[in-house]
Amino acid sequence: MEITIPATLVKNDDADIDDLLDEAVNKGIKEVIRNDDGSLTFKMSKSGHEKLMGEIREEIQETMLDIKTDDDFVSIREIEADESFSQFTMKVDREAFENSLDGFAAIALVMQGMMYQVFDEVDEDELQVIIDIKDADTDDLIDTVIYPDDLESDHT
């Protein structure tokens, strides 16, 4: 199998790319190619791909738990995701959320959700992560952020 990570999801720092390449080899990826456009192409077996998808899924679930329990994000009570990690719901204490920078927690979810989709062979033009922010007490929708559409806006 060949999976290409778009340049928009690859950090431009050579040290970060070298770390990513080392990590990829350690996870059983047979070859990583740096493309001229800044993207990276990973070559792996089908079984290696399945294993990697399971590891990415576990990492995302761990991140969701970490955000929910992190003292830096006191307003966030619950985080849920769909199976494809293209839609997340953050349930928050509305007043605490609106008076904090806790919305920045969404960035980690967005990056991991996009990476999961890339390795799940979603076309680059179809990559999207939607984050609904809801009041934990009333379930009222506070905001919806759609990435990459809202990337340049002032949402988070």
Image: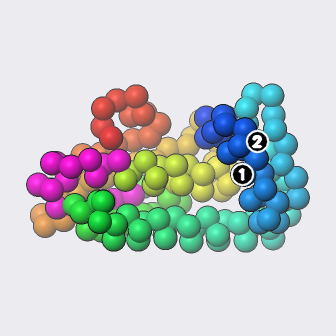
| Residue at image location 52% in from the left, 49% down from the top | 111
Residue under pointer 1: 20
- Residue 37 vs residue 146: left or right? right
Colouring style:
rainbow
| Residue at image location 77% in from the left, 66% down from the top | 27
Residue under pointer 2: 40
Q: Which mark is residue 129?
A: none
Residue 12 visible? The answer is yes
The percent position of residue 149, horizontal first and vertical second, equals: 43, 33
Q: Amino acid at mark 2?
A: Leu
Whole-angstrom CA distance, mark 2 to mark 1, is 10 Å
| Residue at image location 16% in from the left, 48% down from the top | 98
Cβ atoms under marks 2 and 1 closer than 8 Å: yes
The percent position of residue 65, horizontal first and vertical second, equals: 41, 71
Considering the numbered disc 1 on the image, is that residue within a helix, a strand or a loop? helix
In which quadrant of the rendered image does the C terminus lie? top left
Q: Nearer the viewer, residue 47 or 62?
A: 62
Q: Nearer the viewer, mark 2 or mark 1?
A: 1
Magenta extent: 88-104
Q: Is residue 124 above or below residue 92?
A: above
The percent position of residue 28, horizontal first and vertical second, equals: 82, 66
In which quadrant of the rendered image does the N terminus lie? bottom right
Q: Is residue 16 magenta?
A: no
Task: Classify residue 64 by image quadrant.
Answer: bottom left
Q: Is residue 95 magenta?
A: yes
The percent position of residue 17, horizontal first and vertical second, equals: 72, 44
